[in-house]
Image (cartoon, grey):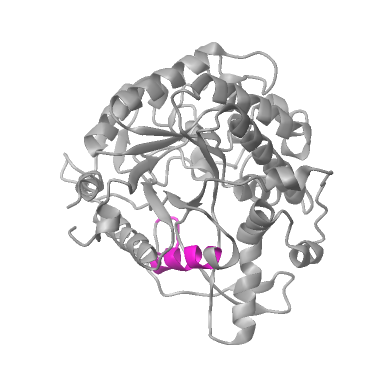
Amino acid sequence: MALLESRLKSPDFLWGVSSSAYQIEGSVLADGRGESIWDSFCRLPGKVKNGDTGAYGSDSYVRWQEDVDMLHELGAGAYRFSIAWPRIKPDGSGAVNHRGFGYYHRLIEELLAKDIEPWVALYHWDLPQALQDRGGWLNRDTAFYFADYAELCFREFGGLVKNWVTLNEPWCSAFLGHGVGVHAPGLVDVQAPFTAAHHLLLAHGLAVKECRELLPAARIGIVLNPWTPRSATARDEDKQAALLASVERTGLWCDPLFNGQYPEAYCEAAGAKLPILPGDMALIKAPLDFLGINYYNEDAVCAAPAQAAGYKNVPTWQKKTEMQWDIVPDGLVRVLSFMSEHWKVPEYYITENGAAFSDSDTDGKVIHDNDRIEYLQDHVLAVQKACELGLPVKGYFVWTMLDNFEWSHGYEKRFGMVAIKQPEGERIRKSSFYFYRDLIAGY
């Protein structure tokens, strides 16, 4: 793919892969790990496709060495993974599980030995169930328990890890977990998402403070999944509807992070009661080194005054992934441009981008996933376009290397560049693995 301009070929541009603990590790009962809200959620009838659970994941807790070897084979410059809070503090607070620290030490040290930079996310949705039993993210104390856990990780791994992520996609934790109930902990409520959102952001701010004090040379940021749908027409009312639609997934998070306040008009219209105490917003607004952007698709909306939200999604023509998400590479350029117009973001990293496809084309040795290759190629070209526009995009991480547990979809939706043959766990490289290897190499 000799289409990339020099900026993306520069050694300063970071090529990586992303994953998360609950989706790949498995071994949920091993070595003192505590139970998480996703372990509990998976046991609820009808919540996860086929009754699947993360008990196996991609078996990476056992096969981590093999996975690091594949990252090395790929030529990845960085690996973004999450630490499982229940492996470090099984009850969320109190006693520390040193066997959990041991696992991540082995992983991080092996990554560094192979010249792969570890990017560590502190929270990718696996809240310890013991804290959920005390209110979870609806309890302000959880933010302070998170800060204690973050401090432990900074002290334990700070000499090895230079890039940290506080939270991954807090919108999902707040709204999918506490509003519509399709993610753990499975609550259905109107006010709860806003309470959870504030406590998640407070946890983020407290962790940033700990990081600055303990690791002044480290870099820290947060990962969002912004939604900035395009307007269905050029009419002013549809353009306004698109702006309105963007707030819940974008402005509700970026306004406090960069401006120190929540979007007042949106919160008033939603009847949101945010449990803000003195000093909270200053903590949340602490300067960031980067913002991670997870991008998969773009939708189109039009004005719908009769609906409470004021907008509605409209049918589209684009090709869809197995998730029924539109494939719109230029939407990545639009979302980055939108964010740069509204907030002073120092650097962007595309921390997740990828697609689920059926992967049915195989010759018995390699899975020929040409749809995924086309998706990745077109989105990397969109990253190049964003750089040409002067947007500060510094890296790109594919989601993901391994087929894994895809939350409420179970194992049915496959995003990986490597298939997992169960139950033995054999790794089978897909064509996209070799495509990304060539791309990283500069071809």
Say if the magenta span includes residue 73: no
Left or right: residue 209 versus residue 375 is right
Q: Is residue 298 visible?
A: no
Instruction: Tell me the quarter of the picture where residue 279 sits.
Output: top right
Q: Is residue 331 magenta?
A: yes
Q: Nearer the viewer, residue 80 or 133?
A: 80
Q: Residue at x 65, y 51 (%)?
A: 257
Q: Is residue 279 above or below residue 378?
A: above
Residue at image coords 59%, 66%: 342
Q: Residue drawn 52% across and 45% down?
A: 289
For residue 407, side relative to residue 90 (left or right)? left
Q: Is residue 52 above or below residue 238?
A: above
The x and y percentages for residue 39 are: 58, 29
Considering every residue shown, the one lying at the far bottom of the view is 235
Q: Which residues are magenta?
A: 322-339
Where residue 332 appears, as percent x and y from the top left, is 44, 63
Point out residue 72 in the picture as x, y percentages from the top left corner.
26, 32
Residue 129 % position (x, y):
67, 27
Taking depth in this image into account, of 411 and 65 the one nearest to the observer is 65
Where residue 123 sits, quadrant-wise, is: top right
- For the N terminus, the quadrant is bottom left
